[in-house]
Amino acid sequence: MIRHGAFAALIALLVLTGCDPAMYQDDGESRVVATTTQVGQVAAELGGDDIQITTLLSPGVEAHDFELTPDAAGAIERADLI
């Protein structure tokens, strides 16, 4: 069982790791995360130069084989639209 002090320290650590101001700087572009290249292409056509696209699945990758990486999780966390 975790003591109250250790629990509070753990919560504080989790909160502070999500508070990186550089991660949330507004560069004027909306961040969009797309699941597949097809969805990413549609989003790119609709958003044009006003969006930054991150596609989770590379061409030819089976969706059932997808494993979330730390980079992909970060992109999802920073996204304005998924």
Image (spheres, rainbow, N blue to C red):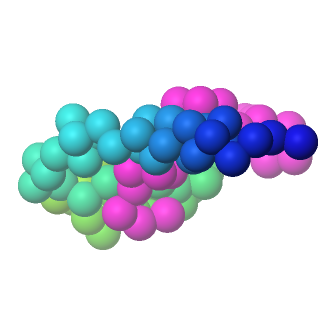
Q: Quadrant of residue 45?
A: bottom left
Residue 76 in the image: x percent, y percent?
50, 50
In front of the other: 57 or 74: 74
In front of the other: 59 or 35: 35
Q: Is residue 60 magenta?
A: yes
Q: Is residue 4 left or right of residue 74?
A: right
Count numbered badges in the picture. 0
Q: Is residue 39 magenta?
A: no
Q: Residue at 60% across / 54% down in the picture?
A: 35
Residue 68 in the image: x percent, y percent?
70, 38
Q: Residue at 49% across / 63% down in the picture?
A: 82
Q: Is residue 46 above or below residue 37?
A: below
Residue 30 in the image: x percent, y percent?
25, 59
Q: Residue at 35% across / 63% down in the picture?
A: 80
In front of the other: 75 or 66: 75
Q: Which residues are magenta?
A: 57-82
Q: Is residue 32 left or right of residue 34?
A: left
- Residue at the extreme left: 28
Residue 18 visible, this angle: yes
Q: Quadrant of residue 22?
A: top left
Q: Is residue 71 left or right of residue 23?
A: right
Residue 65 in the image: x percent, y percent?
85, 38
Residue 55 visible, this angle: no
- In the rendered view of the protein, which quadrant contains the N terminus? top right
